[in-house]
Image (spheres, helix red, strand yellow):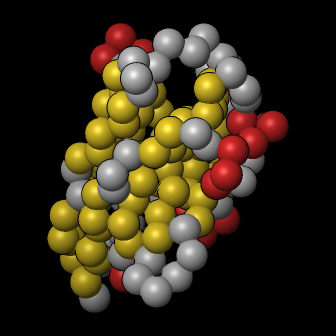
């Protein structure tokens, strides 16, 4: 049974940094796409950054140059390093995973990610 557990959210002032973590258990796919999505209050869930088993990464335009996604395979942990945070980054952040496929095939399509964490809240104040 695959489980994704996020942590690292919190409240921070604009310009600050946070690092989100997502520990994956029971996830044994050799080929995969994993990523971070977020859902701002009252809005749709949107893709933020993804990484796959080839090391390919991509980011939504609004976070390019500020966020970095990376994975520690030895720890089965996915990270999202967020810097220069803005109030518009305020959202519930979710870790997601799609097994057996690379990111070019699933992209930002939420329905193609079979596994989701419970979310971690990020609040950025101005």
Residue 5 found in image quarter = top left
Foreground: 66 or 77?
77
Q: Can residue 87 be seen at all in this image of the molecule?
A: yes
Foreground: 65 or 51?
51
| Above-or-below relation of 116 to 86 | above
Residue 35 location (% of width, % of height): 54, 43
Residue 14 location (% of width, % of height): 29, 77
Image quarter where the C terminus lies is bottom left
Q: Residue at 64% across / 38% down in the picture?
A: 57
In this rendering, position of residue 40 left or right of residue 118? right
| Above-or-below relation of 1 to 116 | above
Q: Which residue lies furthest to the right in this view?
A: 105
Q: Residue furthest left?
A: 11
Q: Residue at 35% across / 11% down in the picture?
A: 74
| Above-or-below relation of 5 to 19 | above
Residue 16 location (% of width, % of height): 26, 66
């Amino acid at each position: 049974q695959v489980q994704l557990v996020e942590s690292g959210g919190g409240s921070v002032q604009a310009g600050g940094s946070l690092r989100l973590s997502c520990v994956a258990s029971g996830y044994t796919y050799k080929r995969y796409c994993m990523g971070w999505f977020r859902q701002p209050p009252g809005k749709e869930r949107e893709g933020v950054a993804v990484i796959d088993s080839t090391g390919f990464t991509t980011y939504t335009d609004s976070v390019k140059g500020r966020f970095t996604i990376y994975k520690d395979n030895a720890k089965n942990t996915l990270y999202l390093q967020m810097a220069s945070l803005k109030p518009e980054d305020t959202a519930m952040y979710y870790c997601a995973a799609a097994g057996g496929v690379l990111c070019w095939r699933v992209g930002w399509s939420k329905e193609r990610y079979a596994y989701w964490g419970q979310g971690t809240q990020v609040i950025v104040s101005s």
